[in-house]
Each structure stands twice: as structure tokens, then as C-alpha cells.
Amino acid sequence: MSTYSTYSPRLHKHGSDELHHTFHSDIPFFGEDIGPISFRDWMWDTEKLVQPLFSKYSQFDILRHVTSRFIGRASEWWQERQYRVKKGRKSCINTFSELKTCTWKHFISSSFRITKEQQSRIEDFIDIGDAFIQNLAKFSRLEKYFKKNLDLLLSEQREREKQKRAREKLERFREFDMRREKKRA
């Protein structure tokens, strides 16, 4: 029932076997927990695995191995979609990119979808957050440096005040001694 595209599976048998042994079991399953976060994680993990393979293997082989990891609701959706393709009611999915778009549209509600502009703004906020954290770390180092120097300055000031009090005390003793000497004389 697999109607992916106009590719003939027989022409890609050798590449498909090699592909199967290379990375098939590394592709995560998808279909048990279908939600925005689990879908995004699955897509990100899968895309990371298949991206380097595009130059070596056909889109057909990659697509076949990725969709073979569908289970549960995802598998049901894929089988229904393939049936509709066979009946001429849906167009074929020929590339991983098309699969990504179709699964995104089918499994993620529009309230969770974001535009490229929104994605760009989110990335900008993340960059600003990262910069803030780096600056906060720098501030923290500067704060420690400032506190250390402030403690040193306060310590020096206390020492000067202590010495000043000691000089004043010594001066008062000298004055007292001088007055006492004058009274004796």
C-alpha cells in the first residue's frame, strides 16, 4: 500500500538495505504521545539524523525509513493518507520536507503554530536572554571584585581611624603629662 512517489523501490534496493543497517533503529518512534512538544522533539531528532543522508540516499529511501517508525495515531494517519493518495484524493509526499510540513499541519493545532516572524522574535528573545545571563555573570564577577575592594577600603579606613584615635589618645596623655609637669614646677 506504500504510494510515496514515482520512485521505484526496486531501483533503490541496495541503498535502502544499507540505509536500514546504517540508521533505521536510530530514528525515534512517533505516534504514542502526539503533542506540540513531543512532535517538535521527534522532528528535531529525526531531522538531525536524516540531514546528512540526503546527499547519499534517495528521498524515497529516507522517507520510507522515517515513516516506518510511525506507530499508533501517526501510523493510522499515514496509512489513511496513503490510501487517499492511491485513490487520487491526496498528492504524494515525495520528500522529507513535504512529510515534515504535512505532519506539522496534521498533528499540531494552529494555535501552536508560529510564523517565521514569531520564530525570529522568539530567537531574538532567547539571544537577549543569553546576553543578559552572560552580562549577569560579568556583573556577578564585578560585584565580587567591588565587594573585595570595598572590604579592603573599609578595612584600611578602620585602621586609619584606629591609628588616629591612638594618636589622639597619645596626644591627650602628652598634654596631661605637660600640664602635670607645669603644676609640679
Image (spheres, grey):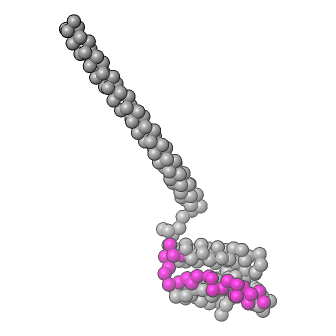
Q: Does residue 56 appear left or right of residue 88 in this picture?
A: right
Q: Residue at left 53%, top 57%?
A: 126
Q: Main secondary structure of the magenta part?
A: helix
| Residue at the farthest front position | 185
Q: Residue 67, located in which quarter of the rendered image?
A: bottom right
Q: Is residue 15 magenta?
A: yes
Q: Residue at left 70%, top 84%?
A: 22
Q: Nearer the viewer, residue 24 or 142?
A: 142
Name the image quarter holding the N terminus.
bottom right
Q: Is residue 51 magenta?
A: no
Q: Residue at left 66%, top 85%?
A: 24
Q: Nearer the viewer, residue 145 or 32?
A: 145
Residue 77 seen anywhere in this rendered image of the structure: no
In this view, 177 is above or below 46: above
Residue 37 is situated, as x and y percent measured from the top left of the image, at 50, 72
Residue 105 is situated, as x and y percent measured from the top left of the image, at 56, 74
Q: Does residue 14 appear left or right of residue 140 in this picture?
A: right
Q: Does residue 91 appear left or right of residue 38 in this picture?
A: right
In this view, 72 is above or below 38: below
Name the image quarter holding the C terminus.
top left
In this view, 179 is above or below 54: above
Residue 83 is situated, as x and y percent measured from the top left of the image, at 62, 90
Q: Which residues are magenta?
A: 14-39
| Residue at the farthest top position | 185
Q: Residue at left 73%, top 76%?
A: 54
Residue 10 is situated, as x and y percent measured from the top left of the image, at 78, 92
